[in-house]
Amino acid sequence: MNGSILIVEDEEKLARLLAEYLEQSGYQAFCLADGEAVPPWVRLHAPDLVLLDLMLPHRDGLEVCKEIRAFSTVPIIMITARIEEIDRLLGLELGADDYVCKPFSPREVVARVRTVLRRTNGSLPAAATGLLLDGQRYRATLRGRDLELTAVEFKLLHFLFATPGRLYSRSQLMDRIYPNERVVSDRTIDSHVKKLRKKIAVVAPGEEFIHSVYGVGYKFEPASKTS
Ligand code: CA
């Protein structure tokens, strides 16, 4: 078994075709046609990857992607019917790991799935750290305990958490946290990270989640013991 893949696609024939190809390649495939059903399904079944069509009934792929990212770092490959869409989607920084354009060959999709899984499998899934982020209520809990973050601390943690292992410069983080302000100093990020680490250390002493790379910036990487 290579992993479980959730296919979210309302064109039944296409979904079935993808499922067949994935199963032939040793994956376990599940299909959902309705965007609304996706976040609860992902929460419950924790698939290894989600193939997410952009155009869905009731709730579109953009919203579904955002909703999944609020609590999970599962790799997501977005599927769109228009190649021009991809630039726009990239600009939105939805946290998708890759994009595929329709029409595609199922073989190509399987190859992308394999590549994305290989790329993301290197790091421990962030969910395994016991960190849960509720993007609607700005609430972060670690192993069942509320971290009591400020809105800014939450945003910072949430952003880093969505792309484990990816390094961001201070100014990239500033742009995310204070999109409309130009006056805040770079040191602001350092001080927020410091406070965040302190709050995490109360619950998980000796475990490092936010790593600094000297002279460059910060990244999220789950649970490496510092002592
Ligand atoms: Ca569709």
Image (tube, rainbow, N blue to C red):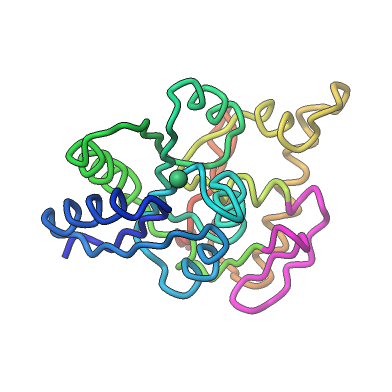
Q: Is residue 146 magenta?
A: yes
At 58% across and 66% down in the image, what residue appears? 131
Q: Looking at the rendering, in which quadrant would you find the N terminus? A: bottom left
* Vertical position of residue 184 compared to residue 69: above or below: above
Up the image or down, 146 lies above or below 209; here it is: below
Where is residue 104 shown, x and y percent of the image? 27, 33
| Residue nearest the observer in this picture, 8 or 213 | 8
Residue 226 placement, left or right of 191: left
The quarter holding residue 178 reads: top right
User: Percent x, y for residue 130?
Assistant: 53, 71
Indicate whether residue 143 is drawn in magenta: yes
Residue at coordinates 46% horizontally, 62% vertically from top-left?
225
Q: Is residue 149 left or right of residue 37?
A: right
Q: Looking at this view, name the residue that lies furthest to the bottom.
A: 144
> Where does the image place residue 199, in percent across and percent down from the top left?
72, 63
Front residue of 79 and 114: 79
Q: What residue sits 17% from the left and 51% below the top?
A: 21
For residue 93, what is the image quadrant? top right
Residue depicted at x 41% and y 39%: 79
Vertical relation: 142 (above or below) 53: below
Q: Is residue 185 toward the left or the right of residue 167 in the image?
A: right
Counting from the top left corner in percent of width and height, residue 116 is at 31, 43
- Residue 19 found in image quarter: bottom left
The mark total stands at 0
Ligand 1 shows up in the quarter that is top left
User: Bounds of the magenta span?
Assistant: 134-154
